[in-house]
Image (tube, coloured by chain):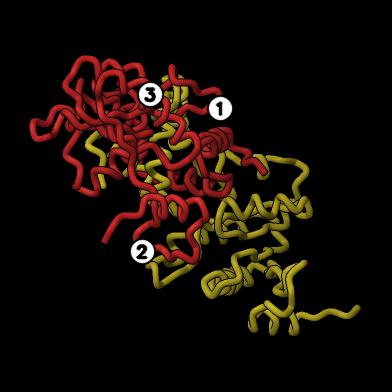
Chain colours: A red, B yellow
Amino acid sequence: MAYDVAALEKLIEQFQKMPSIGRKTAQRMAFHVLDLTDEEAKEFSEAIINAHTKIHRCALCHNLTENELCPICESVNRDKATVCVVEEPKDVLAMERTRDFSGVYHVLHGVISPMNGIGPEQLTIKSLVERCAKSEITELIMATNPTIEGDTTAMYISKLIKPFGVKVTRLAYGIPVGADIEYADDVTLMRALAGRSEL
Amino acid sequence: MAYDVAALEKLIEQFQKMPSIGRKTAQRMAFHVLDLTDEEAKEFSEAIINAHTKIHRCALCHNLTENELCPICESVNRDKATVCVVEEPKDVLAMERTRDFSGVYHVLHGVISPMNGIGPEQLTIKSLVERCAKSEITELIMATNPTIEGDTTAMYISKLIKPFGVKVTRLAYGIPVGADIEYADDVTLMRALAGRSEL
């Protein structure tokens, strides 16, 4: 049921458009906004506009940044010859959390998905090919998600890049650390078996 | 882990301040904002400011409205002698959904809660007493939540109002329709038993 207050209804609608936010949560969020001070509401409103206008893609790796290049691409401590290819900016974050990767990234901003009408030209694949052609890249580590679409995208890119003499690798499949073999799905188990290594 | 993009981090923080929104959901929401068109982001930002500046409390019942009086208080079809007292604006909505109540409301904007430092003076109780003193109210229906705080508030108001010769009633306690007696809690069952009616 709708509130008889247009401004409130409009705000609820805005929140409801967000992913995984239903009517009830959107209502709660709108009431939270009403409880803010004028100062806080202004800050919130500006944060939206600022994020929208200031943030754009890194000219090299397409990760999100406020500058021409992202901090990782600009860093002199990063190995520019090893590029980890990921689907989304949040995957960069996940990789960085490991503190185990000293190379740079390339963010595709999606995967090839004919079902959703997304072809290679909507992704940053062309720019990745250009990067491989122009600079001294020795290895591409495909870190797309272990889904059919992620795998397809990795395969597609691998075929495009190989002529440049760049080594293309893929993150290992297997049982997640700490997981129970009993509950591992068949495909993961098969992959873990195929990728087994000597002790 | 934080993004190295200040404007993005700020937006995520804003969303994270909301009730029941964790870091992951806040991130997802922030990315949703980045995906908006300029037009949409402006609309969203304005919805926040608009809701905050346009919406205030009805001069009579303290429900949310954009005008001096809310539509319910202004309606000529409403029985002004019967006032349903609720905790929050969303409770008005719940009551309206039943389409079974033709009276008007009084929104307390909270309950008496010494634990949270909320006393009667922080609620709209004084204004309720004034309403009872000034206008021809014959019945107050206490529809505060069936919690200790809701009950206490109802009792407190009832004692204040009775001198005005106004009948004060309380919503019935009992088994919710469609629920299973097996899973009803003891207190609800006791209340349901005490409030039993003849068939």
Is residue B148 visible in the rendered structure shown here?
Answer: yes
The label shown at residue B45 is none
The label shown at residue A116 is 1
Estimate the spatial distance between the alpha carbons at disc 1 and disc 3, rounded to whole Å.
22 Å
Q: Is residue B20 above or below residue A140?
A: below
Q: In what quadrant of the picture does the C terminus of chain B appear?
A: bottom right
Pick the residue in front: B152 or B191.
B191
Residue at 39% from the left image edge and 34% from the top image edge: B31
Residue ID for mark 3: A159
Estimate the spatial distance between the alpha carbons at disc 3 and disc 2, rounded to whole Å.
34 Å
- How many numbered dots are placed on residues in this image? 3
The amino acid pointed to by label 1 is Asn
The amino acid pointed to by label 2 is Gly
Q: Nearer the viewer, mark 1 or mark 2?
A: 2
Circle 3 Cα neighbour tier, 10 Å, few/some/many (<14 / 14–19 / ≥20): few
Pick the residue in front: A187 or A122.
A187
Q: Position of residue B67 (x, y in %)?
A: 56, 35
Mark earlier in primary sequence (1, 2) = 1
